Amino acid sequence: MIATIDLQEVTAGSLARLFSAGHVAVMVECPDLVASLWRELLEREEEQLPWQAPLVDMARNYHGCGDITASLGDLFYFQPGRHGYIARKMALAQQEEAGRVAAKPSSFFQSGSSYAPSQEVIDQCWSLGQLLMTAMIPEGELPGRFEVVVQRLKYQETAADFANLGALARNSMGRWGRAGCALDEQRWNAAGPLSPRGLSDLYGLTMLLPAVRQVAKRVNGLMLRRDPSRRLEPGQRLIEGAHYDYRYLTALCGKRDKTLTQVFAAGKWFDLPIDLTTLAVFPGMIASRAFGLPNVLHRVVHLEREMAADRPRDPRTDDVTLLIGAA
């Protein structure tokens, strides 16, 4: 289900062949590369990361749009069962006229000054994205234009922190906004035949009506028991519900204590061993449409467990994920 290869084996079409053969993810062993990216993108103390910043600095660095997955800069999403992270997101693209790769946004406001990632790390991320894209395409020929995305995602240590941040986000909305959040939370619980758009909206509305809520809940409960993609093990809490990424590929590394990314295959969830020595790579929806590669359903769960009291803590990098993708 999950293959492991060395970075030197990532060649034209190599990942496409592995995914076509039935693997849902490929672990690419590249400790030196991951260490270099992690050092430049997470450990440079002169860069103030958004989860360390005042809220006003995050707002100044926010470059949003109607599609939350396409927003850039600094942002946070806390929607129970759907999203649960603070992030810094960049998109890299080749500028033909300038003859270099440029990042968007190019810099980040922080405490009266600004910080810009070095051109060296931007080029390194771009080269990695190109390499993975070449390996993802069966013919090994890159499309005319694509972007490499670089995302740093911070998850929380406790379930209470997730809940409090979700409540804080909802509290900033008006009455109808809060009602919409409540509807969305119920809609995302819709299972089986009730889960497609439209029917899930109807289920969400029904769950807000006291007269018919219990009947709808019982019906959905039957669907949930028959849907293995909705199952959670004891001690697991859903942070990001099962979904497909809308991009060519996703590659993950990170420092995980209480966060798991899981992929779904053969009716079961499999943990991806996210660490600082490998890249966990899987295809997204664009690769499925363009190259016929399988869609990979995945989710993020939080583990309710105690950590050793003497374990050193680093709030800057604990439960942080570095994502390199192409879209």
Image: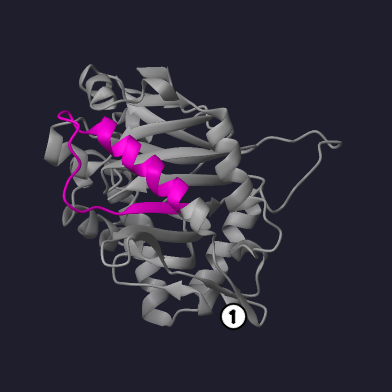
Q: Quadrant of residue 161?
A: bottom right
Q: In which quarter of the image is residue 192?
A: top left
Q: Is residue 37 left or right of residue 144?
A: right
**Circle 1 is placed at which residue position?**
56
Is 69 or 163 nearer to us in this picture? 69
Q: Where is residue 217 in the image (x, y as percent from the top left)?
A: 33, 47
Q: Quadrant of the N terminus?
A: top left
Q: Residue at x 25, y 55 (%)?
A: 203
Q: Quadrant of residue 207?
A: bottom left
Is 82 or 97 nearer to us in this picture? 97
Q: Residue at x 58, y 58 (%)?
A: 163
Q: Which residue is drawn at 38% across and 19% down?
A: 2
| Residue 132 among those drawn in magenta | yes
Q: Position of residue 318 (x, y in %)?
A: 67, 45
Element class at badge 1: helix
Q: Is residue 178 left or right of residue 260?
A: left
Is 153 or 130 nearer to us in this picture? 130
Label 1 is placed on what type of residue? Val
The magenta stretch is 123-152
Q: Position of residue 312 (x, y in %)?
A: 81, 40
Q: Where is residue 229 in the image (x, y as percent from the top left)?
A: 33, 32
Q: In this view, does 209 lie to the left or right of 280?
A: left
Instruction: Give the class, few, some or many, for how many residues have Cα within 10 Å of label 1's Cα (few <14, many ≥20).
Output: few
Q: Is residue 28 left or right of residue 306?
A: left
Vertical relation: 152 (above or below) 111: above
Q: Residue at x 49, y 58 (%)?
A: 119
Whether residue 318 is visible, yes or no, is: yes
